[in-house]
Amino acid sequence: MTLVTSTVTVTDAHRRYAVEAILDDLRPSGDALPIGVLLRPAFNGETLLSFDPSVQTITVSAYDRSLWYLLAEHESREPTTKERLLEKYRGVTPPPPTIQIWRETAIVSASTGFRNTLSASFQEAIAESGSLGGADGISVLGFSFERGAEVRFADWSPRPGSKSHRFVHLLYEVARQNLASTEVERRLEELHGYLALGLPWRVMSSSPLVVRIFGSLSTTELPELRAALEQLPLTEPIVLDLSRLAGMGTLLYPMWRQWLEGRRNVRWVVGDGAAFHLESIGVPAGVQHRDLSSALDGLR
């Protein structure tokens, strides 16, 4: 299914950052009683992953940016001269801000087994007491409808091995495997680090070899990153796509320099988050490209 977009006007409930207002915005319309999770990451857009067992579909619904930061920016914004004059002389106040929502849905093949696994995982997550708050992580609100009534559990930045993490990961994986839009792909990549899903590394193509590294790379990932890089060929052409890399720990620089010694087979796709790091590592400008097609041309 293609991506569907809509726009909502910020209300008082949004300004209070009320969970129910966010759920009302992001839940699929209709009579569906889905099972799913609302994810509210600290620095990225609020996102709902939901599975509807009645029609066997997975849906990702999300704000195109963080509602929390939109509200903060709006509250701190100084009114323009025109807005001040209109309010003073005509009593016309500036309109409230709006935020865009996008949504994608797909049918899940062999979903009977997934439905049973997901339901069992939800019950286990309810029984497990999670952390209810923290900073710079992700808020998790799982929900399901049991005999017509909604049941919920809450957690904060669940770690791998926990019941709530398994529930979220099940939905995450089925969304990743079945939804194809760039918006969903980007959002799942943004959520990857919050959910501690391992090295943000994805092989996009084997011939030519294209590897995407996304999100943020920290020093805790150095051993895993080094091992992954050492598996790459010494002479065959490689494209490392860093167009969606948000940041990198500077303590990783020596490892990159060591890996690059003697290599002439690497081209880079560079976004705003990676340019500074590659310059600091010493990657020549001539092998850096702004898009994948240009990098592939550079291999020829």
Image: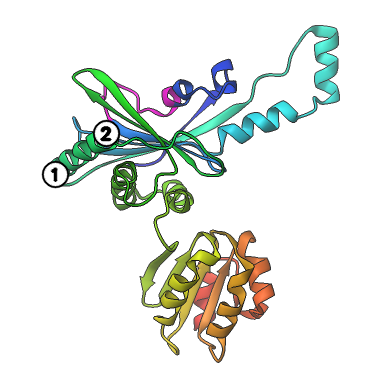
The 10 Å Cα crowd at callout 1, few under 14, some 14 to 19, many 20 or more, is few
Q: Position of residue 174 (x, y in %)?
A: 28, 48
Residue at the far bottom: name it: 262
Label 1 belongs to which residue? Answer: 113
Residue at x 57%, y 89% (from the top left corner): 261
Q: Position of residue 178 (x, y in %)?
A: 29, 49
Closer to the camera in the image, 37 or 25:
37
In three-dimensional space, the C-alpha distance between marks 1 and 2, rounded to whole angstroms, equals 22 Å
On residue 127, which mark appears? 2
**Which is nearer the N-term, disc 1 or disc 2?**
1
Q: Position of residue 131 (x, y in %)?
A: 43, 37
Closer to the camera in the image, 5 or 31:
31
Q: Quadrant of residue 60?
A: top left
- Horizontally, residue 1 falls left or right of residue 239, namely left
Q: Quadrant of residue 267?
A: bottom right
The span picked out in magenta is 23-34
Closer to the camera in the image, 144 or 135:
135
Q: Amino acid at mark 2?
A: Ala
- Horizontally, residue 140 falls left or right of residue 99, namely left
The secondary structure type at the circle numbered 1 is: helix
Residue at x 44%, y 88% (from the top left corner): 234
Q: Amino acid at mark 1?
A: Gly
